[in-house]
Image: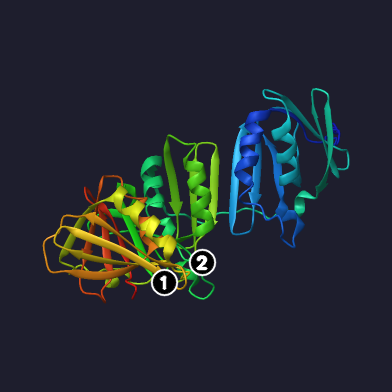
Amino acid sequence: MNQTESLPLPVYEPLHLVVEKNALLKALAHCQGIVERRNTVPILAHVLLETQGNTLKVTATDLEIAFVETLPAHITAYGSTTLSAQLLFDVVRKLPEGSEIELKTSEDGSSLELRSARSNYNFACLPVIDFPLITTGNLPCSFKIHAGELSRLIDKTRFSMATEETRYYLNGLCLHKTPDNFLRAVATDGLRLAQAQVELPPEASSMPQVIVSRKTINEIRKLIDESAEDVSISLSETQIQFSFGPSILISRLIEGNFPEYENVIPFSNDKVIEIDVKSFAEAVDRISIMSTDKLRPVKIHVEASTMLISAHGTGTGSAIEELEVKYEGDPVDFGFNARFILDVTQQISSQTLQLLVGDETQAIIAKDGIDDSALYVLMPMRV
């Protein structure tokens, strides 16, 4: 009779590894903008640590966004645990440069011990089973874009994203392909609009129009600063994933329909004003000090080669500055929210700002004097 040799039951081993300080600190720093410190669900203030092969995987989520970073580690025992993202980050960043950090969970998994040289810390842990499962559905559209191009799309538009409770679909950045094969980013809060575009990656020809949340855009922008390589983007109509080497950010997309924004762009504006952007921004900034209205309105009058910028406030007085411009046409008057126009001037990379004006009731287009790939629309103010 054949006898089957019985195998010993696996013995539980706590998570045990050694990782380099700077690698762990970098991953934990990326998690700080994701975790919800004041959430009523305590686990969402934690990071999940998991061993995999010869790596440590660090995960954070707020249920809408998930961030995962993989870093090299020397693994003694495979396992997983969760602990406070803020506490672990605060301790690790204060350890000496170049430190090696040993992490080991207790036998029952309720705590984690951190050792580094003569330092010894114990952290309370929550059960791994309570940590939300991070899943991605089918993401049929995938393409790569250079980090510099993605950062440009974000920088030239994100300042126009809204922060509304009712029109929630404006609280993000709209990404879509154009009929003439550009990848365009658009943001609007109803009073201003910013759009920028780059050439459409060939693999993105099937991408749907999506709205990426403000929080996701801001976190992605931080990650781009540390990446010189291409960013891989995968998306469906409900979810988007950004991959930067060892880092992955997954986010739900904002549901709803982005407005037909092209209908509000006044392409018929035929009065073109060209002005030195630095001088203009400095003058608007100075003049707006005199405005006591919370919207900081400034009034602009252009005639021949002269622009007059003025503002007044109740009980404060008034101010006026004169600038030289390039303009041919009838005199024009319009008003601006000073903060809105200063946001635009920060995105102009050349020395010249172009203002395309219609009548006093029409929105105004602002453009870079040498770059047609971005434009800005500002609703006029009565001053």
Rendered image quadrant of residue 114: top right
Query: Please, what secondary structure does the residue beneath circle 2 have?
Result: loop
x then y, percent, for residue 208 = 38, 61
Residue occupying the point 62% across, 41% down? 29
- The front one of 367 and 124 is 367
- The front one of 156 and 270 is 270
Q: Is residue 37 left or right of residue 251?
A: right
Residue 257, label in figure: 1
For the C terminus, the image quarter is: bottom left
Mark 2 neighbour class, 10 Å CA radius: few under 14, some 14 to 19, many 20 or more:
some
The residue carrying mark 2 is 163
Q: Is residue 191 left or right of residue 79?
A: left
Q: Is residue 362 left or right of residue 159?
A: left
Q: Nearer the viewer, mark 2 or mark 1?
A: 2
Distance from Cα at disc 2 to Cα at disc 1:
16 Å
x then y, percent, for residue 204 = 34, 51
User: Is there any visible trace of residue 208 in the rendered image?
Assistant: no
Residue flagged by tag 2: what amino acid is it?
A: Thr
Q: In the picture shown, does residue 190 fall above or below 244?
A: below
Residue occupying the point 85% across, 36% down? 9
Rendered image quadrant of residue 341: bottom left
